[in-house]
Amino acid sequence: MKKLTEILNIQYPIIMAPMFLVTNASMMIEAINSGIAAAVPALNYRTDEEFKAAITEIRSKTNGKGLGINLIVNKSNLKMKQQLATCVALKVDFIITSLGSPAKVIEVCKPLGIKVFCDVVEEKYAMKVEAMGADAVIAVNSKAGGHAGNLPPEKLIPLLKKYCKIPVISAGGVGTKEEVDHILKLGADGLSIGSPFIACVEAEISDEYKNACVEYGKEDIVMTTKISGTPCSVINTPYVQSVGTKQNWLEKVLSKNRRIKKWIKMFTFLKGMKAINKAAFTNTYKTVWCAGPSIEHTYQILPVKEIVARFVR
């Protein structure tokens, strides 16, 4: 079975994970030039023109492979069709699909040699995307930042290796070189690492968000369903504590109504993303900051290349 280094022709088996609102072109450039792959959420760009310009800039300033895009493939992403077309036109190296069926993405990308990696949290879905033609699965475990899975890597990786013949890339819970080695010994073919890169010099988020990743640790991470309706890991700030982490009774009832649940979920998602957006870029008491427990090992704000060095030297 191919390792991530072989699939993407990169030096180290690591992807700088796509982080909503955080990842930008400067971070991508530094990561790729440090010998790893990197992915940016297409939704980090408001317009297709901005999206195209970012991909073009990354291509012009990097010296290797490993340029990836994260696509939200469910119906809440009304821009998906155009985003996919742009990825194809500019020939990105790989796409990570999240929160929906990757069938269309695989159908379009497979003949062109664009690799498709699919977020999964269990073996049942992993087997489905493998049958569709996915090139690898991103094994999102319970220690991941953002939308996390249910199983720790010690259970999820062996489970997927048992049922899948395609490579397994572990996502979640890695903040040190020792943890990288641990995940690889479990049988993972690569890693997707996100939260340790939040507090980097190149990120254009607020200093408050970066400093929160320095000051808080793994014990300060909680799961909330109030952002998207799906469990999402955030830093347990006083504001998060005040609003709670569970949907209220009305939100739960509406989310189960067969006629309107799709629209309620979309509304919840958009409302949650707006709150995260405001907290990421401004100094506000409404602090909703996505992060995973691996911020435990973030002690200062560093350039991307120094954070990469922590995992590979």
Image (cartoon, rainbow, N blue to C red):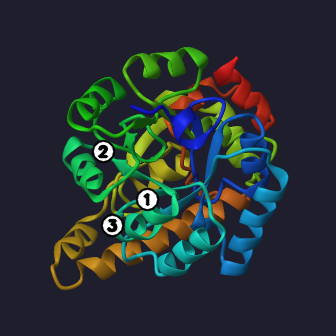
Q: How far is disc 1 from disc 2 in space, using C-alphas?
A: 13 Å
Question: Horizontal placement of 104 versus 130: left or right?
Answer: right
User: Could you tell me how far apart the alpha carbons at marks 3 and 2 are, in whole angstroms?
Assistant: 17 Å
Q: Secondary structure at mark 2?
A: loop
Q: Amino acid at mark 1?
A: Thr
Q: Position of residue 174 (x, y in %)?
A: 52, 27
x, y percent for residue 131: 24, 54
Neighbourhood count class around disc 1 (C-alpha, 10 Å): few under 14, some 14–19, many 20 upward: many
First-in-chain label (3 vs 2): 3
The answer to the question of whether label 3 and label 1 lie on touching residues, with beta carbons closer than 8 A, is: no
Q: Is residue 165 above or below residue 290?
A: above
Which residue type does callout 3 highlight?
Ala
Q: Quadrant of the N terminus?
A: top left
Farthest-out residue, bottom:
259
Residue type, mark 2 in image? Val
Which is nearer the N-term, disc 1 or disc 2?
1
Q: Nearer the viewer, residue 238 or 278?
A: 278
- The residue that mark 1 highlights is 97
Q: Is residue 39 above or below residue 49?
A: above
Residue to which mark 2 is pinned: 121
Residue 262 place in picture, x, y as percent: 28, 78
- Name the secondary structure under disc 3: helix
Local SS, label 1: strand
How many residues crowd around disc 3 within 10 Å: few (fewer than 14), some, or many (20 or more)? Answer: some
178 or 191: nearer the viewer: 191
Badge nearest the viewer, 1 or 2: 1
Q: Is residue 284 visible?
A: no
Q: Which residue is mark 3?
A: 103
